[in-house]
Image (spheres, helix red, strand yellow):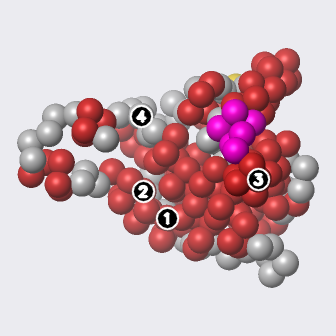
Amino acid sequence: KSESVAEHSFGLAFLTLVIDLPKDVDRLKLVKMAILHDVGESIIGDCVCDQGTFFNQEKYALKNQDEKNAIEHIFSNSSYTELKQLALEFLEHDSEDAKILKALDKIEMLMQAAEYEKLVMPGSLNEFWLSSKRYLKSPWLLDHYNCLIDCKNKGVAECNCLDLKVLNQANKLKKTIKSSWVLKEIQNPDSVA
């Protein structure tokens, strides 16, 4: 089963809560931004512009415009101004906070890629590892990336370095089924929402 956008957003928000951040970073702002960072995909879907070290600039520009329009539509009510601003700030990567969150987004994605690689052939998702490194410019972010690479290369079942150990618990939570759906024998929980 593939990870949903909501599961990914939860994982990123959780990572943002637990990871050591530079002192001048507003953690609460980043958590809000993490929850909202892919909200436009609820309308346009997920669109991948990276393939290994190749980045499709034209596809990215189209995706960005579509996602901006989706964010404008979702938050068209004036009472959502802050949420719209945060979602657009992340989309445009025009602040240091947005750049940090984009890097953390890649760290969370790599943790999920490591999970998927356990289920299929190791190394089968190398394009994700290659495409992510360009977003990790700060030494503290590269430490997290290198930790994940070491765990991946050594075949370690769970990464136990840095703050990523806590995020492994969040990944387990994302896979936990709500027992109330099971108890009620509901086959498709989306149908009762």
Q: Position of residue 26 (x, y in %)?
A: 77, 73
Labels 2 and 1 touching (C-beta < 8 A): yes
Which numbered mark, 4 or 3, is in the foreground of this view? Answer: 3
Question: For the residues marked 2 and 4, what is the alpha-carbon distance in whole angstroms?
Answer: 13 Å
Q: Disc 4 marks which residue?
A: 2
Q: Disc 2 marks which residue?
A: 171
Numbered mark located on residue 81 in the image: 3
What amino acid is labelled 3 in the image? Thr
Mark 2, secondary structure of its residue: helix
Disc nearer the start of the sequence (2/4): 4
Mark 3, secondary structure of its residue: helix
Q: From the viewer's side, name the closer residue of 188 and 176.
A: 188
Side of 185 relative to 133 (left or right): left
Q: Residue furthest right?
A: 94
Mark 1, secondary structure of its residue: helix
Q: Does residue 97 show up?
A: yes
Q: Residue at x 43, y 62 (%)?
A: 170
